[in-house]
Amino acid sequence: MSFYTCGPNEALVLSGCCLSKPRLVPGGRVFKLPWIQKLQRISLNIMTLSIESPRIYTKQGVPISVTGIAQVKIESQDSTALHRACQQFLGLSETEIKHVILETLEGHQRAIMGTMTVEEIYQDRQKFSEAVFEVSSRDLVNMGVTVVSFTLQSISDEVGYLKALGEKRTAEVQRDARIGEAEAARDSGIKAAMAQQAERAVHFQNQIEVAKSKRDFMLKKAEFDREVETQKAVAALATDLQTAKTQQKIRNEEVGVRLIERQKQIQVMEQEIVRRERELEAQVKQPAKAEKYRLETLAEAEKNRLILEAEADAEAVRARGEAEAFAINAKAQADAEAMQKKAQAWEQYKDAAIVDMVLSTLPRVAAEIAAPLNNVDKITLVAGPNGEIGASKLTGEVLNIMNTLPEMVKNLTGVDLAQVVRSTRV
């Protein structure tokens, strides 16, 4: 039995008797039975491949040549992938392995170039490299190979397309340079103008500050002058005030003297009033009080006399009242008896009594009707050609009024005087 080892950059593949499938040992050791087992080695080193694709037509139909650099190696971390790599490459030299992988990568690179424009490949190399890397990795992993990296190394063409792009870009850069120079000149002019404006602003600001300083000076000076004038005015006012106080004090003294004189005069007047009151008391009030007492005494006596007389008169009036009341009562009783008898008579004679009362009243009615004629000084009677003239006309008017009395009595009492008279005759 032999013992073999390998470094981390290669793998041992043991196959033969006593093994159902090959034993893969990456970077390790293994025992080998002589004559009945076979031991092989496979490299795990990174292989650098230069992938050249000359005159490949892009999506626009422009032929270009591209050179890419790929870093590949046998997968050793995954036993399944390592097993597939052993199936594909075991027994081949490194050159042969590179050739197989190179053909695969070149085919994918050509395919990606046909789907992109020159500008995309030239300007976005990262996108091209990622596309080739993703597509080739899916195929190479089935071979047990891992693509570590892929980079687009160079791109060229034989028709001058890239040169034209460069010239275009150069023109754009030159244009941008001229624009930048113009913008720089413009910015310079703007900055110069801004600097001049700032300078003028600073100048004006200085003038403003000077004016402010002058204004502050004048304000302070005016304030100081006002304070000086105020102090002068205060001093003058204090002098005037002191003078006024002195004068006021003098006037107060004068008023005090006058007040004392007035008080003395009042005292004299009060004494005079007291004297006059005493004199009045002696000459007027005492006699008036005596006269008042006399009059009050006389008035009281007169009042008592009148009261006694009033009581006597009241007694007499009460006696007369009682007599008059008795007479009135007696008369009322007599009138009541007369009215009762009259009522009985009316009840007995009925309409005849009414007629009698009416007939007895007619003369008074006629007298009342003719009474206004007594106050007439002159009467002028006017009649027509056939009318009566004279006193007969006037008396006729009175009789006409009297003739209407039966009808009026009938309307008032309901008694027909003519009917009553006719019934009485029968």
Image (cartoon, rainbow, N blue to C red):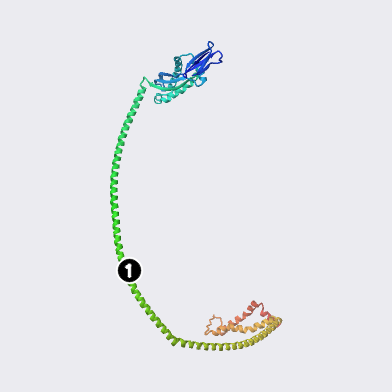
Give the quarter of the image for residue 175: top left
> 234 left or right of 148?
left
Q: Quadrant of the C terminus?
A: bottom right
Q: Give me the residue at 28% from left, 53% from top.
A: 217
* Residue 297 in the image, given as x and y percentages of width and height: 52, 88
Residue 127 left/right relative to 83? left
Residue lying farthest to the top in this orientation: 35
Q: Is residue 44 above or below residue 204?
A: above
Give the residue type at disc 1.
Lys
List the residue tagged with mark 1.
245
Q: Position of residue 190 (x, y in %)?
A: 30, 38
Could you tell whether 293 is left or right of 333 in the image? left
Vertical side of 314 occupied by 177: above or below: above
Image vertical order of residue 322 relative to residue 178, above or below: below
Residue 396 visible here: no
Residue 309 falls in image quadrant? bottom right
Question: Residue 374's quadrant in the figure?
Answer: bottom right
Q: Residues within 10 Å of mark 1 (few under 14, many from 20)?
A: few
Query: Is residue 176 in sight in this rendering?
Result: yes
Location of residue 84 with respect to 412 vertically, above or below: above
